[in-house]
Image (tube, rainbow, N blue to C red):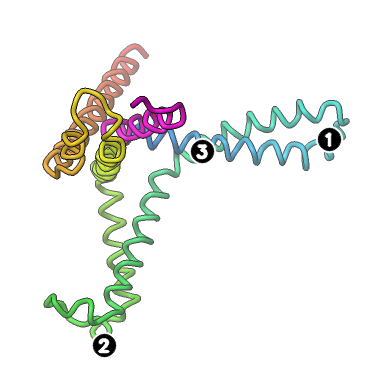
Amino acid sequence: MSPDFITTTAMVLALGFGVAFTYFGYAFVTQLTSLVGALGGALLGSALARGVVAPTVGVASPNLLLVSLVGAIVGSIIGSSIARSTQRLAIVALCFALSSSVAYSMFGNPNFLDPVSVPSFGSGLLDPFLASIIVGGVIGVLVWQFYLPFLAAVTSLLGASILQQFVRHWSDLLPVFHSDVWTTLGTNHVLWLLLVGTGVVYQYRRYRRRKSSRRRLRRIHRRLS
C-alpha cells in the first residue's frame, strides 16, 4: 500500500520535525524564532511604511509598492534581531507563568495535596498566590541559569515523542519492518528514553564545540589585531 501525496508530505514533515527537535532542537528553535520574528517584522514594517511613512513623505501611489517592500525588508531584519535576542527571556517568562499556574492550582486545592505530607498553604502558613509566585520564580531562575540543558531536554523530549507518534500512526505504511514491529518500537519507553538521552547529549556537545570554536576565533582575531 503506497501513501498518497498528502500522506507522504505529512510523513516527511513529521519525520523532519521529529529529528530536528530531537537532535537540533536548540538551533532549530532559535532559527524558528528568528523566522517568526522576521515574518512579524516584515508585516508590521510593510504596514507602517504604507500607512505612516508614505503619507508623511508624500509618496505617490505608483511607488507605494517599493516603499512597502523596503519597509518589509527593514522590518524583517529588526524583527528577526529582536526575536533572537528576547528568545531566552520569553521562554523563561513562559516557564514562570506555567509553573506559577500549576503551583497555584495545587496549593489552592487542599485535597490535591492530601496524599503528600506537605503543609497546607491555604491555612495561614503561606498564601497560595504568594507560594505560586515563589515556585514560579524559582523555576524561572533555574531555567535562566541552565537554559541550554533545559532547552535541549525539552526539545529532545518533544522530538522523541513526535518520532514515536509518527511510527505508531503510520506503522502500516513504513517499510523494512512489519507494522507490528513498528508499533512495538513506537510504544517502547526504553527506546524513547534512548532518543531523548542521545538528543540531549548531542545537542549539548554540538553547542559546546561551536562555543569553543568561537572562542578560538576571538583569540586569533585579538592576536592579529
Residue 145 picture location, percent across and down? 26, 48
Say above or below: 123 vs 206.
below
Percent position of residue 63, x then y: 82, 26
Residue visible at 24% across and 39% down in the picture = 164
Residue range (magenta): 1-25
Residue 103 as seen in the image, left or right of residue 200:
right
Label 1, on which residue? 57
Which quarter of the figure is the N terminus placed in? top left
SS at badge 2: helix
Q: Please say whether residue 202 is visible from this viewpoint.
A: yes
Q: CA distance from mark 3 to mark 1?
A: 30 Å
Which comes before the other along the chain, label 2 or label 1? 1
Q: Which residue is mark 2?
A: 124
Which amino acid lies under the numbered mark 3 shown in the image of this protein?
Answer: Val
Disc 3 designates what residue?
Answer: 36
**Dot 2 surroundings within 10 Å: few (below 14), some, or many (20 or more)?**
few
Q: Nearer the viewer, residue 91 or 187?
A: 187
The span from disc 2 to disc 3 (Cα, nearest Å) is 45 Å
80 relative to 140, above or below = above
For label 1, the crowd category at 10 Å Cα-Cα, with few meaning under 14, some 14 to 19 and many 20 or more, is few
Residue sitting at x 69%, y 32%: 71
Mark 2: amino acid: Gly
**Front in this rendered view, residue 72 or 12:** 12
Say which quarter of the image contains residue 24.
Answer: top left
Query: Which quarter of the picture shows residue 85?
Result: top left
Looking at the image, the residue that sits furthest to the top is: 224
Main SS class of the magenta portion in the image:
helix
Residue nearer the viewer, 218 or 142: 142
The x and y percentages for residue 60 are: 88, 30
Identify the amino acid type marked 1.
Answer: Val
Judged from the image, the secondary structure of the residue bearing numbered disc 1 is helix
Residue positioned most to the front: 1
